Structures are given as structure tokens and as C-alpha cells.
Image (cartoon, grey):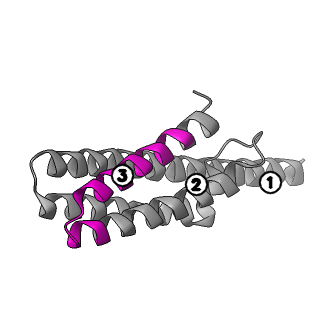
Amino acid sequence: MKKLLSVLVAGGIIFGSLNAAETDHRSMLMKDMRTMLDAMEQIQRGGLYSSTDEMKAGIKKLQGTLKTLESEEIKFILPKDQVYAYKFAQKSAHMLRLYSDDMITSIDAGRMDNALDDYHQLLKQCTSCHIRIRNW
């Protein structure tokens, strides 16, 4: 009887710690998603007000959040019933980094039309991920 009770208590502790870890991962992702939204708004605001410094600051902020999407920890948060979700998140993070790097290059070269195209591609990556993974 004592063994059974010990096993149940140990199982409860393990389950509770796993549940807490998932909650921590989820809250970390939600924080990063809010930061990504702020970054996209900052990039857009910088573009509308012709402030390349603000655009670059927004890009830097966006790139700082990509480590979450690129990490293995994202697996804990993604829907379990969507096998492709992890690879899709990885690809989205890669494309976000690619377009944001290109956007900096375009800004530095004074090609604001290209920078605007890169912003549009960033936004498409965000939307695509939300449509497929969050089932919008």
C-alpha cells in the first residue's frame, strides 16, 4: 500500500512538473509573439515616418525572438496532431531571418522599395504560420 501511494505521489509530481514546464514554454512563446508583433509595428512605423533607425531597431527586436522558433523547445508548444508543425515553424523562422537580413541590406543601400517588399514577405510569413498552425 505504501509503495502504491509512493508511486502515485511520484507520478503526480512528475506530471505536475511536466505541466508546469509546458506552461512555461507556452508563456515564453506568447511573450515572444507579442514582441514580434511590436517589432512588426515598429518596422512599419519607421517606414511610414522615413526613420531607418526605427526600422532597424524593429528588425533587431524581431530577430531577437526567432531563437524561440528555431529551438527544440517549440515542440512542446505546437499542436501534437500536426506532424508538420515543427518543420513548418523552423522554416518560417529561417525565412523570417532571411527576409529581415535582406531588409537591413536594402535599407543600408537606400532601396526603400525593396525594404517594403521584404516587410511584405515578413508579414506573409507571420500570416502563413498563423493560418496553418493555429488553424485560422
Instruction: Tell me, yes or no, if residue 13 can be seen here.
Output: no
**Residue 45 in the image, given as x and y percentages of width and height:** 17, 45
**Does 80 sit left or right of 47 as displayed?**
right
The one of 18 and 53 positioned closer to us in this rendering? 53
Secondary structure mostly seen in magenta is helix
Is label 3 in a helix, a strand or a loop? helix
User: Magenta segment range?
Assistant: 105-128
Q: Which is nearer the eye, 13 or 60?
A: 60
Name which of mark 3 and mark 2 comes first in the sequence: 2
Q: Judging from the image, what secondary structure is the residue with disc 1 in? A: helix
Q: If you read the primary sequence from the N terminus, does the residue marked by circle 3 or circle 1 appear first?
A: 1
Separation (CA) of disc 3 from disc 1: 61 Å
Tell me which residue sits at (30%, 72%) in the image: 105
- Residue 104: quarter of image: bottom left
Q: Nearer the viewer, mark 3 or mark 1?
A: 3
* Structural distance between the alpha carbons of marks 1 and 2: 22 Å
Amino acid type, residue under disc 3 in the picture: Asp
1 vs 2, front mark: 2
Image height of 123 relative to 86, above or below = above
Nearer the observer, 106 or 130: 106
Residue occupied by mark 3: 117
Residue 47 rendering spot, x and y as whole percentages: 18, 50
Asked if the residue at tag 2 contacts the one at tag 3, i.e. Cβ–Cβ closer than 8 Å, the answer is: no
Circle 1 residue: 6
Marker disc for residue 30: none
For label 3, the crowd category at 10 Å Cα-Cα, with few meaning under 14, some 14 to 19 and many 20 or more, is: some
SS state under label 2: helix
Say few, some or many: other residues with alpha carbon within 10 Å of mark 2 (under 14 / 14 to 19 / 20 or more): few
Q: Would you name the residue on which mark 2 appears?
A: 21
What residue is shown at x 77% (from left), y 39% (from top)?
81
